[in-house]
Amino acid sequence: MKVGIVGAGKLGTALARRSVVAGHEVLLATRPGTRDPGLVVEVMAPGSVALPAQQWGTVDLAVLAVPFHVALTVDLPLPRGTVVIDPTNHWEPVDGPAPDLGGRGTTEAIAAGHPGLLWVKSLNQLGYHDLDDLTDLAGLPMRYATDHDTARDTVADYLSSLGLRPIHTGPLASGAAFEPGTAVFDATATVGNSAPDTIAGAFASKTL
Ligand SMILES: NC(=O)c1ccc[n+]([C@@H]2O[C@H](COP(=O)([O-])OP(=O)(O)OC[C@H]3O[C@@H](n4cnc5c(N)ncnc54)[C@H](OP(=O)(O)O)[C@@H]3O)[C@@H](O)[C@H]2O)c1
């Protein structure tokens, strides 16, 4: 799969590293103005290619791994119909007080600002360190929500390739049920913080 990731921070580079190991072709867009994107990617995500999103062409899947407040308005020069996973969480220390989203989930708000893309909410329910630390994620449950049936197989295949167990929850609005502060988010994060040798036991003891 050709995977494009916007944002070369903690989550973006961890995803890139794991995606490369999974055999994907990974394009990684650093923040515009980064002095040496090639060096950042060579050090942080070897095997990936540093490339601004406007030069990606068609990708099978994109991931928007930037802070939530950036994601709301960031320029995403991707072809119409591109499948985009939004892993962002509103995090007050980084993003400031929660904005009034008019009852929408955070990914619905981001999608509204970027029409023409096939938005999927997922990958927000794990810690970036798990992608590096846990060679075997033991099928960590990973919920995904989308309004687009055509995006479902691509996303499920990608999540599976990373060692996750995709669970489709329904339309994009259903993603609000696994944002921070929800029981699902807290339960998954707790499991994700378990040591590798206890993770299977943690699953067994939880209703996820
Ligand atoms: N960390 C986790 O475990 C985790 C888990 C699940 C979800 N998330 C979510 O994933 C998102 C990223 O988190 P993170 O921990 O990776 O944050 P981070 O380490 O701060 O990385 C964010 C990255 O976004 C880059 N960026 C900012 N504006 C950009 C733009 N216009 N184009 C391209 N890149 C841009 C930043 O570049 P500079 O460094 O150059 O400023 C930075 O590298 C957040 O929304 C977070 O809530 C994080």
Image (cartoon, rainbow, N blue to C red):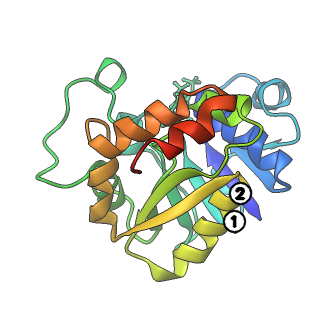
For marks 2 and 1 on the same chain, the one whose residue lies earlier in the sequence: 2
Label 2: few (<14), some (14–19) or many (≥20) C-alpha neighbours in 10 Å: many
Residue shown at 45% from the left, 34% from the top:
189
Query: Is 118 on the left or on the right of 130, as rendered?
Result: left
Mark sitting on residue 69: none
Tag 2–tag 1 contact (CB < 8 Å): yes
Q: Is residue 81 visible?
A: no
Residue found farthest to the top: 93
In the rendered image of this protein, does residue 54 appear above or below residue 9? below
What secondary structure is marked by label 1? loop
Query: Is 50 on the left or on the right of 63, as rendered?
Result: right
Query: Is 187 on the left or on the right of 105, as rendered?
Result: right
In the rendered image of this protein, does residue 7 appear above or below residue 94? below
Location of mark 1 (residue): 59
Q: Is mark 1 within 8 Å of ligand 1?
A: no
Location of mark 2 (residue): 3
What secondary structure is marked by label 2? strand
Label 1: few (<14), some (14–19) or many (≥20) C-alpha neighbours in 10 Å: some
Q: Is residue 156 visible?
A: yes
| Three-letter code for the amino acid on which mark 2 is drawn | Val
Residue found farthest to the bottom: 150
